[in-house]
Amino acid sequence: MRDYLKHYINGEWVESTGNETMDVINPATEEVAGRISLGTLEDLDRAVQAARNAFPTFSKTSKEERVRLLEAIADEYEKRKDDFIEAITEELGSPLSISEKVHYSMGLNHFRETARVLKDFSFTEERGDTTIQKEAIGVSGLITPWNFPTNQTSTKIAGAFAAGSPVILKPAELTPFAAMILTEVFEAAGVPKGVFNLVNGTGERVGNGISSHPGIDLVSFTGSGAVGQKVSENAAKTIKKVALELGGKSPLVVLEDADIKKAAKIAVSNVVMNTGQVCSAATRVLVPNAIHDQFVEAVKAVLPRFSVGDPRAENFAGPLVAQKQWDRVQGYIEKGMEEGATLVAGGTGKPEGLKTGYYVKPTIFTDVKNDMVIAREEIFGPVMSIITYDTVDEAIDIANDTVYGLAAYIAGRDPEMIKKVAHGIQAGQIRVNETQPDFTAPFGGFKQSGNGREWGDYGIEEYLEAKAVIGMPT
Ligand code: NAD
């Protein structure tokens, strides 16, 4: 049982000024795994003041100092490997191996890669008599979701620190444990006081407080579109810069010449990863009519390899994060059946033998039309919609027929066809066949998937303002 009842403000663990707490539930056991304090607006004010006090000094540190800071953070982060893995499995229900290989590693990579990219990052550009300086934007408020507890926090914090911006983090209240360990990492790495502040709490109170606070210059939000809109509305009142990383309904375009077995594996692993709670998951799989039946057979054959079950056993995926999420996913599976899609695998209810825990069956639908609800709305569970097409132009049209544009995937062989699809799809990141993540490549969305970019040098740019000095004496 973890009692994380303090916030971290101005380099110290402090009591909350309120006395409300919230239980954090382990989604595999449905038991209470710990508690956090729900912060107040007074707690937030104190954190904002600490960050503002830290800004003049931190924003003027040299690039080399900030590279060293990020490297020190990465070193300390590595020392806490086992603690991160255990905490993420407890709060999110992800299998221990995924907590390690995906969650723990992504956080580490953001600090290491941002440090590396920062070494070559130029904050000054000379254009004749004009000098353009890129300077830290001010104080940044960071609001993160529950599905990637170390990835979302680390990418934002690494970018902000690289730019010289002090931060206030409000992690997701469903999965706050990893952020508490991360805070201990910052303490151990010697992050100067006031540069990192953490206030736990609800979106309604602390989240709204961040987006409307006059002392915060930028709000970086990752989460749902509905909350993203609210954040933007609040931020507009103080003309804050807003960076949004929102949802997706990403396509995987399987080309006719694809290796069908490999394409089926990409499709299944993508949609079952993190129990489908991935903003960039390929939930719409576009398959040529000519190879549809073979593809469906290949999906059915590979599906059992991606087992769902106890996160402490050898499984690929665990439960969904919460009962609310379970109800939501069940609702969409029912909707898919009502709408006339054909169930290939899975369906409603819990997988056999898994009564306790928010487990769902990985569910594959085919005969899906792109105007069905299951093809339009983000389900955030392991539910795949197979949609057929005849020509590549038609596939591109279907891929783009969505309000989202976060990611897209292509499985195929012909380089010209792959290029055509990659150029045709409006999405922030396109991945071709089996690839590893590139932590220096920008991540973010077109259309309603957001309006910012994270990771690597683009992630640093997010926290900078450009200052033009015209006629600077030499
Ligand atoms: P959410 O929008 O409900 O919550 C995200 C965060 O916002 C939480 O910390 C929450 O407390 C806070 N929040 C809630 N109400 C708020 C308010 N009124 N003002 C300010 N903050 C508020 O999202 P979620 O359910 O935690 O996460 C799932 C969503 O996140 C999905 O839509 C998913 O696609 C998206 N997501 C996007 C990315 C990306 O990089 N594009 C990554 C992960 C998740």
Image (tube, helix red, strand yellow):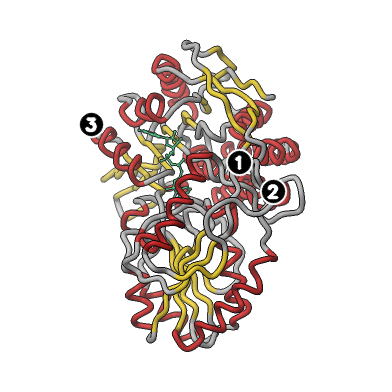
Q: Amino acid at mark 2?
A: Pro
| Drawn side of residue 38 relative to residue 368, left or right | right
Answer with mark 2 or mark 3, whichever residue precedes in sequence: 2
Say which quarter of the image contains residue 338: bottom left
Answer with mark 1 or mark 3, whichever residue precedes in sequence: 1
Crowding near the residue tagged with mark 2, few <14, some 14–19, many ≥20 C-alpha atoms within 10 Å: many
Say which quarter of the image contains residue 389: bottom left
Q: Residue at x 65, y 44 (%)?
A: 355
The quarter of the image holding the C terminus is top left
Q: Amino acid at mark 1?
A: Leu
**Residue 245 in the image: x percent, y percent?**
41, 48
The residue identified by callout 2 is: 95
On residue 237, which mark appears? 3
Q: CA distance from mark 2 to mark 3?
A: 42 Å
**Residue 35 in the image: x percent, y percent?**
59, 23
Total marks in image: 3
Q: Is residue 456 visible?
A: no
**Residue 179 in the image: x percent, y percent?**
59, 33
Q: CA distance from mark 1 to mark 3?
A: 35 Å
On residue 92, which mark appears? 1
Q: Please name whichever residue, 382 or 116, is drawn nearer the observer in this view of the structure.
A: 382
